[in-house]
Image (cartoon, rainbow, N blue to C red):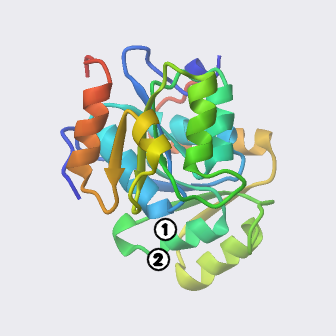
């Protein structure tokens, strides 16, 4: 029901961007929207879990690792892998990825990154879609 | 910044939605995007001020909840906007029904026929 309220179209994949820096979140979200994707924004892991626990169909989670709050991106990734195993997962950080991240994420993008890299990785992991 | 394949079409304006409840922020933001607005999302007044300090983002309207965690509530944000960005429209919503009505009014003023929210 929430999906129809927010105008989600089943043919358009949905990406959930989790980033606590508002300007970076905006930059990524607008770039992915300009590629025809549907983008939802969360500022921390708790917000991301609220969205994932709603009826909104999300195909890909793009999350920063270092975030304030009770859970960082690694803890979020552990929960996501346990409860939403079908979800594609891209993790990003300015630090080198630890073992769990290397083994678990479908892609890791080191910060600072350019938006072309983000778009390429997102498109690689999602099925082709009609725009 | 990379130029997207689908640049944002000429929009009805830019709305800064400030709301700490994520699902409400999401629904209001998507609704306003469907009405032709470019929407910037902020989870609290501190994030909103960071956005408002970026002249290239050219916010036209602040659409803000009143009660929010952080250093400032919606009234404080409104006062900040009055002193630093005079002329900026500020819409304060204190409840979900008020937020829904205000979003529908904004939608109508964009020239788009709003769908029910």
Q: Which of B109 and B25 is in front in this view?
A: B25
Question: Which mark, residue B101?
Answer: none
**Subunit under mark 1:** B
* Residue at disc 2, secondary structure: loop
Residue A129, position as x, y percentages in the image: 27, 18
Residue located beneath label 1 in the image: B51
Q: Nearer the viewer, residue B80 or A66?
A: A66
Tell me if B12 is positioned left or right of B79 in this view: left
Q: Residue at x 37, y 33 (%)?
A: A106
Task: State whether residue A92 is above or below residue A38.
Answer: below
Q: Nearer the viewer, residue A72 or B15?
A: A72
Tell me if A2 is positioned left or right of B107 in this view: right
* Residue at disc 1, secondary structure: helix
Q: In which quarter of the image is residue B74?
A: bottom right
Q: Which residue is drawn at 25% across and 29% down?
A: A124
Tell me if B39 is positioned left or right of A80 in this view: left
Residue B88, position as x, y percentages in the image: 53, 70
**Subunit under mark 2:** B
Task: State whether residue B87 is above or below residue A32.
Answer: below
Q: How crowded is mark 2: few (under 14 residues within 10 Å), some or many (20 or more)?
A: few
Q: Which residue is drawn at 25% across and 18% down?
A: A128
Q: Which of A54 and B49 is in front in this view?
A: A54
- Residue B77 visible in the picture: yes
Residue B50, position as x, y percentages in the image: 52, 72
Residue located beneath label 2 in the image: B53
- Residue B60 visible in the picture: no
Task: State whether residue A117 is above or below residue A58.
Answer: below
Discs 1, 2 touching: Cβ within 8 Å = yes
Tell me if B49 is positioned left or right of B21 in this view: left
Q: In which quadrant of the rendered image does the N terminus of chain B lie? A: bottom left
């Amino acid at each position: 029901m929430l999906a129809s309220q927010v105008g989600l179209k089943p043919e358009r994949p949905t990406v959930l961007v989790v980033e606590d820096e508002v300007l970076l979140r905006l930059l990524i979200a607008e770039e992915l929207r300009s590629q025809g994707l549907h983008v939802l924004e969360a500022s921390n892991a708790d917000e991301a879990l609220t969205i994932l626990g709603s009826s909104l169909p999300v195909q890909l989670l793009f999350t920063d690792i270092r975030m304030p709050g009770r859970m960082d991106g690694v803890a979020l990734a552990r929960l996501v892998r346990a409860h939403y195993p079908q979800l594609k997962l891209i993790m990003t950080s300015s630090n080198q990825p630890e073992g769990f991240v290397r083994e678990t994420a479908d892609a890791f993008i080191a910060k600072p990154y350019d938006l072309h890299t983000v778009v390429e990785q997102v498109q690689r992991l999602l099925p082709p879609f009609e725009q | 910044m990379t130029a997207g394949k689908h640049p944002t079409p000429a929009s009805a304006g830019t709305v800064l939605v400030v709301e700490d409840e994520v699902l409400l922020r999401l629904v209001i933001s998507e609704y306003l995007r469907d009405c032709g607005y470019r929407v910037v999302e902020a989870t609290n007044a501190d994030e909103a001020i960071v956005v408002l300090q970026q002249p290239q983002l050219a916010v036209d309207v602040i659409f803000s909840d009143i009660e929010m965690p952080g250093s400032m509530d919606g009234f404080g944000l409104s006062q900040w906007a009055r002193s630093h960005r005079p002329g900026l429209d500020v819409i304060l919503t204190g409840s979900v029904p008020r937020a829904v009505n205000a979003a529908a009014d904004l939608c109508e003023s964009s020239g788009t026929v709003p769908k029910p929210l």
